Image (cartoon, rainbow, N blue to C red):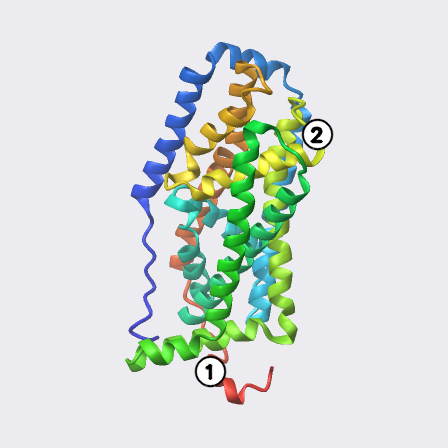
Amino acid sequence: MNRSESTEWKVPWKGMIFGIAAGTLALILVFTQVANPKDILDELQDYPIGYFFAALACLMGAWACDGVRMRSLTTGAGKPAPWWELVLILIASNFITLITPFAAGGGPYVVYVLYRRGRSLPHATAVVAAGGFAAHTGLALLASIVMAAMGKVSPELAGSVRYVRLGFVVYLLIVLVVIILAYQGQRVQRLIIRRQVAEEWMGEFQAVYRRIFRDRGKYFLRAVLAGMGFFGLNYGAGYMILSGFGVSRGLMRYGLTVLLGVAPLISPIPGGAGAAELVAYHMLEESLPIDALGTFIVLWRTMTFYVPVVVGGTLLAYQLMRYPRLPREQSAGAVILPEENDHTR
């Protein structure tokens, strides 16, 4: 193993504590500032429970799509991982994502697990980087399509929707530029990297990353579609919760849940605690009575935060006990051909 490769992955305990505390505080604020706890509990008794289970089915479908996304990329990189194992790893990493600022903490954990399962660090990093690009491309495409298809919105939402539409177009362009720069990274590498160890690391990263795009990019495109499916089903969970209250219809209702789902991603607070609730309050205060609004926020937060935290945290605890005790799998065929001699292209 290279000295530059570290097997350590530190558990972000501070982030976990802060994230859970922030989520709990947001729930307390809902109960104390938005609606009376007794009114929320009374409203919950009348809520059609079938919509909650439909939302849960959407959430599980989203997890399955996320496994497809990474399965496609590990296959494209030449070392496919079992779909079911990737699903469990990604659910655990999602727990870390939810308790870190800007929802950005799960990637290093996936790199760590792939490393323990026999990939080199450059190989694992290239797969996870491509996975992140594919997911964000899928999110930008999905949101752009939904925002464009929503049609006319209320005057209260028109300004926000306009900025969100423009923001996602810009966001998609930025992601595409980053994808291209990473693909052409050897030119950038020669300008800024001089040390041999770093050059070797970047050389392997580059070779794996480019390999994912072979065969006309079919592996990456599948990952983008799976990313769209992941976010589409994730927001579908919010759509099901909102359907139980009869707010709006069709694409308008789904567009509202997309706006709600995007809020935590741009919040520096772990889990988007407070930001998502504030957006929900301003978006739905004209459509729902105050007690129903408080009930929706509790149900939506439960489905998008507390359920993933409980399931993901449990899986993470198990995996952190299991993977460090397993001997690291040896990578067969660790040598990757240079770009000019790579006959797989």
Q: Earlier in the sequence, mark 2 or mark 1?
A: 2
Where, quadrant-wise, is the N terminus in this rendering?
bottom left
Whether 319 is drawn above or below 53: the answer is below
Where residue 113 sits, quadrant-wise, is: bottom left
Image location of residue 260, percent across then percent down: 53, 35
Disc 1, SS: loop
Judging depth in this view, the residue of 322 and 49 nearest the camera is: 49
Above or below: residue 276 compared with residue 75: above
- The tag on residue 335 is 1
Q: Nearer the viewer, residue 198 or 10?
A: 198
Label 2 or label 1, whichever lies nearer to me, is 2
Residue lying at 62% horizontally and 70% vertically, measured from the top left? 217
Give the Cα distance between marks 2 and 1: 55 Å
Left or right: where 325 falls relative to 345: left
Residue type highlighted by circle 1: Val
Kind of residue sitting beneath label 2? Arg
Rendered location of residue 312, percent (x, y): 48, 43
Label 2: which residue? 249
Residue at 43% over, 56% down: 107
